[in-house]
Image: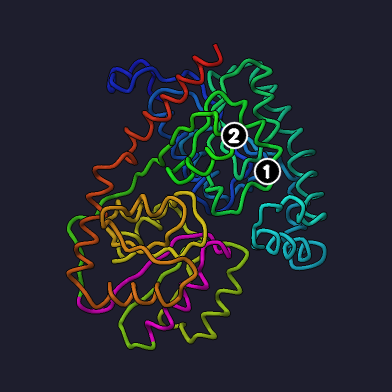
């Protein structure tokens, strides 16, 4: 690794970079924006001379693409281990009881409508599971590992990346060890109907610095902790930019990169694509991502007779996703809820026209005619936007140029995004000191 002194000589305007940072997440799913944010941050910090360690409260299998990415960057990732034989047995029996039942309960619980009294509506089985995994076995294992590592390599900053205000024990642990704590929230609370664990807010309030990933998230979280300043931590976007614009009069290539779950609105996208197909417009849609609803979405594709127009590629590596982005014309995301989608940022950096829903941080990202905004859950609105962009090559070219210009002049490039996070680290150190 290049030394910190050498790195700072190369980029003196970056300012002071902490010697050592611990990044803590509650899980690394196979595919997700929070996970991409964390690994890109870890990589960027390391390039600027910082020693980084990443910790996951949930097990991360060796084939997980984020684990592979960190390993390639030589950034340590710790997660609770599952014995190989047990993991193999679970994988072999995942469609049998109790795993099938547990998967069904998880899907129902994740996709159920949110209300202000969501806490009272929790499934008791899910509460027990959550307590066992994140309040018991896994949490205790992570706590022991943090104790062990910090005794030998004390971090300058502990940066917790939560999801819907989880990780309630980490902030008190860090503060008890007099470690500066930064907490970044990756969801948009108002779009989710409120936090699932309101009692955890008081733990988040104790962090030296609280941050979100979009202005929309900032406003929604400020309503829960009105007496605290909320920073914004922008995603770090690194993707190869397309050389020249690619406008075709023939078939238009759409692409969507998302987890295959209800919240991402893949069903809405498929129904909209069916309308576009019935209108005899030439297009193809590529959907990249994995998730528990893939089988259901593929069945819907068959029911809508979209096999020739729509393909599911499953989870792909960063490089493969980048290659597909550079080969597409339009990025479309039909989300019902969002924080700030990293995949959309990467699509804009690659020079794609963008269609997104009016949720989370998407409207602020596409402000100034940098993309088309549609009503969430509206099949007709999305189909109309897709048709408009297929039939109007001038519009498509204009949107591609606007998206690329927006990203080039934005706060999402590595330098600006990292500097805002480093400012939070300095602030946390000052508050804690």
Residue 331 or 324: which is nearer the viewer?
Answer: 331
What's drawn in magenta, residue-wise?
Answer: 249-277
Residue at position x 74%, y 52% in the image? 87
Query: From this viewpoint, which residue is outermost toward the top?
Result: 433
Q: Earlier in the sequence, mark 2 or mark 1?
A: 2
User: Mark 1 sits on what residue?
Assistant: 58
Which numbered disc covers residue 24?
Answer: 2
Label 1: state its secondary structure. loop
Residue at position x 52%, y 16% in the image? 431
Image coordinates for residue 376, horizontal then vertical, percent: 47, 66
- Classify mark 2: residues with Cα within 10 Å, few (<14), some (14-19) or many (20+): many
Residue at position x 74%, y 33% in the image? 141
Residue 136 among those drawn in magenta: no
Residue 265 among those drawn in magenta: yes
Which quadrant, please, contains the N terminus?
top left
Horizontal placement of 273 versus 80: left or right? left
Residue at position x 45%, y 23% in the image? 50
Residue 34 or 199: which is nearer the viewer?
Answer: 199
Image coordinates for residue 98, horizontal then vertical, percent: 82, 62
Image coordinates for residue 97, horizontal then vertical, percent: 82, 66
Horizontal placement of 164 versus 108: left or right? left
Which quadrant, please, contains the C terminus?
top right
Residue 296's place in the image compared with 205, above or below, is below
Residue 168's place in the image compared with 324, above or below, is above
Image coordinates for residue 351, horizontal then vertical, percent: 26, 56
- Classify mark 1: residues with Cα within 10 Å, few (<14), some (14-19) or many (20+): many
Is residue 236 in view?
Answer: yes
């Amino acid at each position: 690794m290049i030394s910190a002194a050498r790195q700072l000589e190369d980029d003196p305007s970056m300012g002071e970079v902490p010697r050592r940072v611990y990044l803590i997440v509650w899980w690394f799913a196979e595919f997700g924006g929070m996970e991409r944010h964390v690994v890109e941050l870890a990589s960027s910090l390391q390039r600027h001379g910082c020693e980084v360690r990443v910790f996951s409260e949930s097990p991360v299998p060796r084939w997980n693409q984020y684990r592979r990415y960190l390993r390639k960057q030589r950034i340590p990732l710790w997660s609770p281990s599952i014995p190989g034989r047990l993991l193999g047995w679970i994988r072999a029996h995942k469609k049998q009881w109790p795993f099938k039942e547990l998967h069904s309960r998880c899907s129902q619980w994740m996709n159920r409508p949110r209300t202000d009294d969501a806490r009272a509506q929790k499934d008791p089985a899910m509460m027990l599971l959550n307590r066992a995994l994140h309040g018991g076995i896994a949490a205790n294992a992570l706590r022991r590992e943090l104790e062990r590592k910090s005794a030998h390599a004390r971090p300058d900053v502990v940066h917790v990346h939560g999801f819907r205000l989880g990780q309630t024990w980490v902030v008190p642990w860090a503060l008890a060890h007099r470690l500066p704590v930064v907490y970044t929230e990756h969801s948009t609370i108002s779009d989710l109907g409120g936090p699932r664990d309101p009692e955890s807010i008081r733990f988040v309030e104790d962090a030296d610095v609280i941050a979100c990933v979009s202005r929309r998230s900032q406003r929604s979280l400020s309503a829960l902790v009105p007496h605290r300043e909320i920073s914004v931590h922008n995603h770090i976007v690194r993707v190869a930019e397309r050389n020249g614009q690619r406008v075709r009069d023939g078939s238009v290539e759409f692409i969507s990169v998302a987890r295959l779950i209800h919240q991402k609105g893949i069903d809405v996208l498929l129904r909209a694509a069916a309308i576009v197909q019935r209108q005899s417009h030439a297009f193809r849609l590529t959907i990249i991502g994995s998730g528990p609803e893939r089988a259901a979405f593929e069945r819907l594709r068959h029911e809508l007779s979209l096999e020739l127009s729509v393909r599911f590629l499953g989870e792909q590596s960063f490089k493969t996703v980048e290659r597909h982005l550079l080969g597409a014309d339009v990025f479309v995301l039909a989300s019902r809820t969002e924080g700030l989608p990293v995949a959309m940022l990467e699509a804009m950096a690659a020079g794609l026209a963008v269609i997104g829903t009016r949720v989370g941080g998407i409207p602020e990202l596409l402000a100034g005619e940098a993309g088309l905004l549609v009503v969430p859950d509206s099949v007709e609105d999305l189909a109309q936007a897709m048709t408009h962009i297929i039939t109007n090559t001038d519009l498509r070219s204009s949107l591609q140029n606007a998206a690329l210009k927006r990203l080039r002049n934005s706060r999402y490039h590595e330098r600006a995004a990292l500097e805002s996070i480093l400012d939070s680290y300095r602030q946390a150190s000052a508050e804690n000191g």
